[in-house]
């Protein structure tokens, strides 16, 4: 058990995109703190740690999302927190990307986040407590070439979090987002061996890419009672990328 993050023991969390990458790291951090974690994803790609269970979910489906939340509530009686980590990326600028690619990225990254939040919000409002963390991106804070749909969707997630925090705060429900920088995950694996990947690392003030666990620990903190007076915040976990403009040489 992780002794550094208190107040998570026996709490129940739902993590979308929880079977790999940042979502899995979030689930691992929560489980290490004694929580029960439901990892919802399209397919289970890795062995889940003790304290985690897998459930299949297409975050674009409102019916599947509502059914999953109802099942979790029936089994555990409550959902203390939600992490929306399910996401995809499609490279392309305004001229090169197709309408289908644009709509797919927004459907998964933005609408999927909204549907998951909507499904748990009424329960959290009724209980008068709960914490939601959406995984955004530094590409939602800053522009990025040939990444139009992803930047747009993640930027909208950050703004949605502010609006949700405004709507849910009076019910005792906190809503925050985290914007990771360059993190070594299956989604970024294609960059790891390319010169552009190394150049991207050098733009981070810490001169390295991050690890999924470094994002997971930040998420666990925001979900915990240690962050009880924090809501409506977008926290960059980016090795300083968004703090200063660094040109890789």
Image: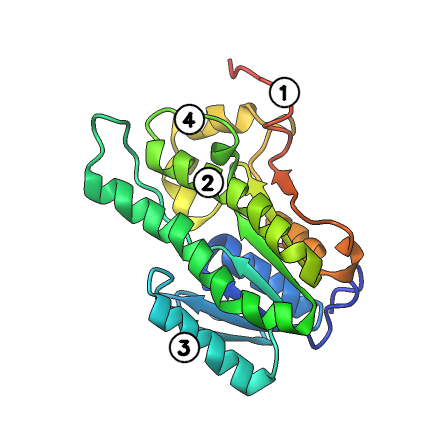
Could you say where residue 226 lies in the image, as x and y percent from the top left?
A: 79, 57
Q: Is residue 34 visible?
A: yes
For numbered disc 2, what is the local secondary structure?
helix
**Cα distance in 3D space between marks 2 and 3:** 26 Å
Residue tagged by mark 4?
Answer: 144
Q: Which of 53 and 141 lies nearest the eye of the viewer?
A: 141
Specify the quadrant that holds the N terminus: bottom right
| Tag 2 near tag 3, CB within 8 Å | no
| Mark closer to the observer (4, 3) | 3
Q: Residue furthest bottom?
A: 75
Disc 2: CA contacts within 10 A as few (<14), some (14-19) or many (>=20): some
| Tag 1 near tag 2, CB within 8 Å | no
**Cα distance in 3D space between marks 1 and 2:** 23 Å
**Cα distance in 3D space between marks 1 and 3:** 44 Å
First reached walking from the N terminus: tag 4 or tag 3: 3
Residue 156: image tag? 2
Residue tagged by mark 1?
Answer: 244
Q: Residue at x 27, y 40 (%)?
A: 102
Disc 3: CA contacts within 10 A as few (<14), some (14-19) or many (>=20): some
| Tag 1 near tag 3, CB within 8 Å | no
Q: Residue at x 40, y 49 (%)?
A: 109
């Amino acid at each position: 058990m992780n002794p550094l993050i208190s107040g998570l023991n026996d709490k129940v969390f739902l993590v979308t995109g929880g079977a790999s990458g940042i979502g899995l790291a979030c689930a691992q951090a929560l489980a290490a703190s004694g929580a029960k974690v439901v990892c919802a994803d399209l397919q289970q790609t890795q062995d889940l740690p003790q304290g985690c269970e897998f459930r299949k979910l297409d975050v674009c489906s409102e019916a599947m999302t509502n059914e999953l939340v109802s099942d979790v509530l029936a089994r555990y009686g409550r959902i203390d927190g939600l992490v929306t980590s399910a996401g995809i990326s499609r490279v392309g600028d305004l001229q090169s990307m197709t309408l289908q690619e644009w709509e797919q990225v927004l459907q998964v990254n933005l609408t999927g986040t909204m549907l998951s939040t909507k499904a748990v919000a009424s329960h959290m409002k009724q209980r008068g407590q709960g914490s939601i963390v959406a995984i955004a991106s530094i590409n939602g804070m800053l522009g990025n070439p040939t990444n139009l749909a992803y930047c747009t969707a993640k930027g909208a997630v950050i703004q949605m979090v502010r609006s949700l925090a405004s709507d849910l705060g009076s019910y005792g429900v906190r809503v925050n987002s985290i914007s990771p920088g360059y993190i070594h995950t299956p989604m970024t694996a294609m960059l790891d061996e390319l010169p552009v990947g190394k150049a991207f690392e050098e733009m981070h003030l810490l001169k390295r890419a991050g690890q999924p666990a470094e994002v997971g620990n930040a998420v666990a903190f925001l979900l915990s009672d240690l962050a009880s007076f924090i809501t409506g915040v977008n926290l960059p976990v980016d090795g300083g990328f968004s703090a200063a403009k660094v040109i890789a040489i």
